[in-house]
Image (tube, rainbow, N blue to C red):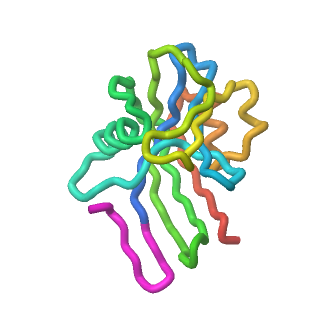
Amino acid sequence: MDIKYINNDFQFLYRVSCVIFNKDKTKVLLFNCEGRNIYLLPGGKIVQKEESLQAIKREIEEELGYKDLKYSFLAISEEFIEDKGYYNQQINLIYQGIYEGNIEKPKFKGIEGDWINFEWVDINKINNYKIFPKEIKTAIINPNKIYHFVENLTK
């Protein structure tokens, strides 16, 4: 069961996501959903009694089929969003992962559905993309330290 709490129009979510780099760290994997112009990091909700590292490994395998990424912790993000009639507050633990395989397709659909569009983005062009959380661009450009972001889209 996902770790989430709902009370009327308030929802709390405990999430995990990952900045996935290619092996030489020149590209990063992002996704967007059909009809939306914002890009996100792969990931999902942490389930009860699950450690965050296990959660990101599970989510990446479910979404992409990648099993052998090398992970390290990158950031924590506190996110406040109004969406679908809810005021959402979420804690997002963000890892970085290294994909050692060859990039065969720069754009492809996700395993979980045709509405998920993945794209390998050149890091030098990262500022051309609208990404949430927006501060993650800093961590993508300089992934050698740990970050804490607060993103409030309710103001």
Position of 97 relative to 14 (above/below): above
| Residue 35 located left or right of residue 98 | right
Position of 57 relative to 100 (above/below): below
| Residue 35 located left or right of residue 146 | right
Residue at horizontal 63 percent and vertical 51 percent from the top = 34
Residue at horizontal 36 percent and vertical 41 percent from the top = 62
Give the image location of residue 71, x and y in percent. 39, 29
Position of 135 relative to 10 (above/below): above
Q: Is residue 2 magenta?
A: yes
Residue at horizontal 66 percent and vertical 29 percent from the top = 121
Give the image location of residue 38, x and y in percent. 68, 50
Give the image location of residue 56, x and y in percent. 37, 41
Most foreground residue, 84 or 117: 117
Task: Write the start and end of the magenta stretch as one range.
Answer: 1-12
Most foreground residue, 81 or 105: 105
Query: Hey, which residue is sitting farthest front in the picture?
Result: 114
